[in-house]
Image (spheres, grey):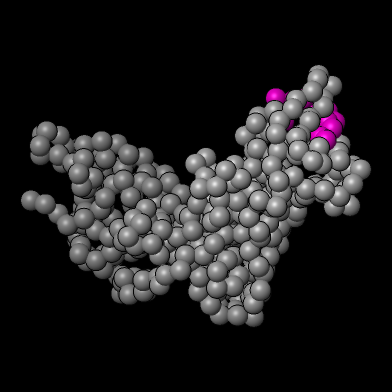
Amino acid sequence: MKFEVSATDLLKKLQVVHGAVSSNPVLPILEDFLFEIKKNTLTIRSTNLETTIISKLSVVADSNFSVAIPATILLNTIKSLPEHPITISVDEESFGVTIKSQFGEYKLSGDKPEDFPKLPERDNINELTINSGSLANALTHTLFATSNDELRIAMTGVLFQIDYNKVIFVATDAHKLVKYTIGNVTSEDSNSIIVPKKGLTLLKNALPNDEEVTVSYNQKNIFIDFKDTSYILRLIDSKYPDYNAVIPVDNNNILSISRSDFLSSLRRIAIYANKTTNQVVLNLGDNSLNISAKDLDFSNEANEDIGCDYGGETMQIGFNAKFLIEMLGVLKPEEIKIEMSNPTRAGIIVPTEQLENENLLMLIMPVMRSH
């Protein structure tokens, strides 16, 4: 049983699928790729039981067959070969694998394909289509805001709130929150699911630029299909907190500012902040903003004045510089607004101009001032 394939084409697929290969698997077979050949199409699959990645490519094969091949040694071998056709043959009885290139021959032991975990069933699924660029935007702006606290398992994922013609993506770690809404979605359903961060991070890096992506889901899994690749992620079975309850309304104090100027200033001032609280204080007056930080333990302090547009009440409000820097770092627009009600309530960060059919809102909790 053998097939011929371009080393470069195979490498591209292996690099995508390798994302779900476990480094410390519960089962040895999870260190493998599953290769399945049917009608000159090679389907490569990997799984860590929470994330499954599948990708297909055309090959020239002498028969239909399947084999599990150790992922790391195969990937490293193909990576070191130049662009050239290679032949991979498999012994039907021992599942030994031989790779032949223009340079020589490489032998490794494969495993029985029957030992590889079965694919999750696509039963009772709801389906929607979404633009890949919009989905990538939503993930870029939400993944960083998820929690790492396994005791609050819901917050370690991203909430997908599907509501017929729109999807709201929400992530929070209780200090910061991001809500990213995509309109112009086709769905016949209204539902909420929580998708784990790890699988979504892998997906984000593999999404094509501007294509339709099909998203299907049931109570256990989400299936994301595009081109010749599929991601299957096991959902987090938990209840997401009521995020709307923490988004303040009546934020009449609005600061308009250049994102890059603000970010540069914060990076300098944060050096002088207390290392425990990372607190920076915004002193807001009539079209004026002073940013300051103090670390009384080391007698360090710094402050800067920065140009802005502000017509609200005179106010002093403290924020965690690390979180602010992180949030401003994923934003792309140059002009942003920070909307505030008072120093004890969360600040809302929004771009001055939103993308068409997409809406972004970021929230950051204040750090109470220490005197």
Left or right, 355 with respect to 297, comes to right
> What residue is drawn where x is 25% and y is 53%?
319
Q: Position of residue 34 (x, y in %)?
A: 70, 47
Q: Residue furthest left?
A: 371
**Residue at the spot x=55%, y=73% of the render?**
219
Which residue is at a point 24% across and 66% down the rendered structure image? 345
Q: Residue 79 magenta-drawn?
A: yes
Magenta span of residues: 78-89
- Residue situated furthest front in the rendering: 93
In the rendered view of the protein, which quadrant contains the N terminus?
top right
* Vertical comparison of 321 with 360: above or below: above
Q: Position of residue 300 (x, y in %)?
A: 15, 34
The mark tally for this picture is 0
Residue 272, image x and y in percent?
A: 21, 37
Q: Indicate whether residue 14 is drawn in magenta.
A: no
Residue at the right extreme of this rendering: 62
- Res 314 visible: yes
Q: Image check: 61 left or right of 208?
A: right
